[in-house]
Image: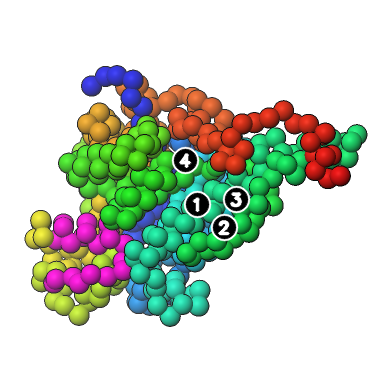
Amino acid sequence: MSGAKQLRLGAFMRPVSIHTGAWRYPGALADANFNFPAIKSFAQKLERAKFDAFFMADHLAVLNMPVNALKRSHTVTSFEPFTLLSALAAVTDHIGLMATASTTYDEPYHIARRFASLDHISGGRAGWNIVTTANPDAALNFGLVEEIDHDERYARAREFYDVVTGLWDSFADDAFVRDVEAGFYFDPARMHVLAHEGQYLQVRGPLNIARPVQGWPVIVQAGASEAGRQLAAETAEVVFAAGGSLEAGKAFYADVKGRMRAIGRDPEAMKILPGAFVVVGDTVEEAVAKRAHLDSLVHYDSGIASLNGMLGYDVSGFDPDGPLPEIPPTNASQSARERIVASARRDGLTIRQLAQRAGSFSGLAFVGTPRTIADEMERWLYEEGSDGFNVMFPYLPGGLDDFVDKVTPELQARGLFRREYEGATLRENLGLPRPSNRFFPAVATPTPTGAEKVLA
């Protein structure tokens, strides 16, 4: 295959590896989630490899699994995303800094202020992953006895997005005059009071920070349910899709980008990046052996807890070597649940086998040599299964080193991935437009006179 298409690559880094056995792998840093010097080196190496973004997921509960599983897991505890990304902003120059923030358990003003701050601190490299948080244990940490219904979470998220982006537009880009001689710091005529009163939210505004460098931080979304796909079509600029087969990827890609066309959005204004678990070997056999050894490090206690969490239903009382029972509808993440159930039915997997997959990684995986991995990524790109990938490393630092040192050069040699960053901001590097200010669409020349008239 040949052409001008370019892969977009994000790095899934919170936890540093999603695989439950990663911290036990030979040569892995067991403390990597809390080892800032190591995380800093990871970010800097990814930047040298010209990755688009360093992405941090987030969890709002620790006690979301039995203690016997919890004691074996490295995935539920790690640094708070904004604190870490702000620190990484000071030691990197180009790589994007994306963080998950919940629309269910936070307030729009907080979210708008944090991301605007991160965008300014990083020089325009922030991205917000909008999640609705499906976790009853998280609900208990925020004063709720029961979690909010799935569809209601998404309805609130849609309004939440409108409020946050409205707050980012509180000031025109030219609002801060800073005329020392005249004594005018900003022009009140270039400030907007949001005064939002909606079904779920009431927010006055304005935000107490200048408009972000990128206009808005890049909007990221990860839901794959009907409500999640529609929210993505209406709002998202990057979608972290649930990885599966190429045919499933193509169907998802066509569906979400088709929804964009239907509402008048340019499909090129969104990059779809499935999560891809990548294990690299000098031979395919070596890569397969690495994956098998990694999976063997997942204890059943840990795997069954992960499986229960993905299903939103406790199957630990069933025969581990029997089939998965019928799973009733739940408030769990629809995409994860459907992926697990589908694989169980398709492959005839037992609960024990599903638990091992859930504790390792049950989605899209590329296990092979740099050449075979590049072949698969190229096929996904050219057959419109994705615009790139959110790469998940099997263990750190070795898994990251394998990808950066071996796979990235192969992609660059094929002309599939950049050798230098295109711009200074995350939007520029992703090829995304800077949004106009909905309240101040035309940027006027700053004039102290206008401010003086308003203040008089």
Residue 167's mark?
3
Query: Pointer 2: what residue?
Result: 196
Can residue 336 be found in the magenta stretch?
yes
User: Given the image, on which type of amino acid does mark 1 rest?
Assistant: Asp
Q: CA distance from mark 4 to mark 3?
A: 24 Å
Camera-side mark, 4 or 2:
2
User: Given the image, on which type of amino acid does mark 3 rest?
Assistant: Leu
Q: CA distance from mark 2 to mark 1?
A: 9 Å
Spot occupied by residue 109 in the image (x, y as percentages of width and height): 60, 58
Task: Say which label, 2 or 1, has the lower sequence index.
Answer: 1
Can residue 392 be found in the magenta stretch?
no
Q: Are marks 4 and 3 in contact (CB under 8 Å)?
A: no
Q: CA distance from mark 4 to mark 2?
A: 32 Å
Quadrant of residue 250 within the rendered picture: top left
Q: How many marks?
A: 4
Element assignment for label 1: helix
* Residue 391 in view: no
**Above or below — where is 416 with respect to 213?**
above
Task: Say which label, 1 or 3, has the lower sequence index.
Answer: 1
Query: Pointer 1: what residue?
Result: 162
In the picture, measured across the screen, residue 43 lies left or right of residue 387, that is right
Query: For the point 82% across and 40% down, which residue is it?
Result: 453
Query: For the point 22% across and 48% down, which residue is it?
Result: 244
Quadrant position of the C terminus in the picture: top right
User: Given the image, on which type of amino acid does mark 2 rest?
Assistant: His
Q: Residues within 10 Å of mark 2 (few under 14, many from 20)?
A: some
Query: Pointer 4: what residue?
Result: 53
Query: For the point 13% across and 66% down, which residue is it?
Result: 350
Quadrant of residue 91 within the rendered picture: top right
Q: Residues within 10 Å of mark 4 (few under 14, many from 20)?
A: many
- The magenta-colored residue range is 325-344
